[in-house]
Image (cartoon, rainbow, N blue to C red):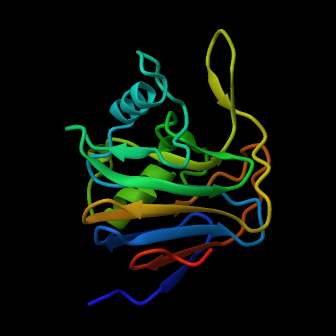
């Protein structure tokens, strides 16, 4: 039986996990702008995802920093679970950052890794990868860092489950990142193609 389209509103610093069937699509929108977030699934391997997408895009040993439309996110066996269908934004889906965690915040607030592991019902150490959406980064000789995250009202991305998967999404709890303005995210799910 086909899933009816459903929606969830995520406040900043919260997360949800949604079971998807193969072919289901998830649309994540920042209605007011300013709010980014992260998503993951059990077994998501950021490093292998960067490597496979790099081989597919460049035909050589070159890793990608971002998962752009048409790229897939893989587990540690190289099995694709999620495809990035569309990114309606000047920003991209980063597949380098591992997410934040409670211990880095002076006030002890849960980071996205804490939020997503709780939503998935697992220990934080079981999360093997994260994808940050609506990111832009810069690289210098010492490292890789977020630049200004100018998330516009109505920016959205669409993900497609390639096989059954539980996809967890968080609304970033870090209000100190450049350009972040805490606001709600809208998460919509549908069987097949979702309205855009």
Quarter containing the C terminus: bottom right
Residue 192 occupies quadrant: bottom left
Q: Percent x, y for residue 43?
A: 26, 47
Q: How many marks?
A: 0
User: With 55 as the anchor, is 97 left or right in this view?
Assistant: right
Residue 20 occupies quadrant: bottom left
Compared with residue 38, is residue 68 higher up or lower down, i.e. above or below?
above
Q: Percent x, y for residue 75?
A: 27, 43
Q: Residue at x 54, y 39 (%)?
A: 104
User: With 158 as the anchor, is 3 left or right in this view?
Assistant: left
Compared with residue 59, is residue 132 higher up or lower down, i.e. above or below?
below
In this view, the residue farthest toward the top is: 141
Observer-nearest of 137 and 99: 137
Observer-nearest of 194 and 168: 194
Q: Is residue 162 visible?
A: yes
In this view, the residue farthest toward the front is: 59
Residue 27 occupies quadrant: bottom right
Q: Residue at x 43, y 50 (%)?
A: 113
Q: Percent x, y for residue 2?
A: 32, 87
Compared with residue 113, is residue 60 higher up or lower down, i.e. above or below?
above
Q: Residue at x 58, y 78 (%)?
A: 195
Quarter containing the N terminus: bottom left
Observer-nearest of 188 and 191: 191
Q: Is residue 39 visible?
A: no
Observer-nearest of 192 and 6: 192
Compared with residue 188, is residue 86 higher up or lower down, i.e. above or below?
above
Q: Percent x, y for residue 80?
A: 30, 48
Q: Residue at x 71, y 53 (%)?
A: 175
């Amino acid at each position: 039986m086909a899933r009816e389209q459903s929606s969830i509103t995520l406040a900043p610093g919260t997360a949800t996990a949604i079971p998807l069937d193969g072919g289901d699509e998830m649309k994540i929108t920042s209605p007011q702008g300013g709010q980014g977030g992260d998503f993951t699934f059990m077994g998501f391997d950021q490093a292998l995802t960067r490597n496979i997408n790099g081989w597919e895009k460049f035909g050589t040993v070159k890793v990608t920093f971002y998962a752009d439309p048409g790229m897939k996110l893989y587990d540690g066996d190289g099995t694709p679970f999620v495809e990035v269908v569309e990114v309606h934004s000047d920003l991209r889906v980063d597949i380098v950052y591992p997410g934040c965690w409670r211990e880095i915040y002076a006030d002890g607030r849960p980071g996205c890794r804490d939020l997503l592991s709780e939503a998935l019902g697992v220990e934080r150490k079981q999360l093997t990868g994260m994808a940050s959406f609506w990111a832009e980064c810069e690289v210098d000789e010492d490292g890789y860092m977020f630049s200004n995250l100018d998330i516009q009202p109505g920016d959205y991305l669409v993900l497609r489950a390639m096989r059954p998967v539980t996809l967890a999404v968080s609304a970033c709890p870090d209000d100190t990142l450049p350009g972040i303005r805490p606001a709600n995210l809208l998460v919509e799910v549908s069987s097949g193609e979702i309205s855009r």
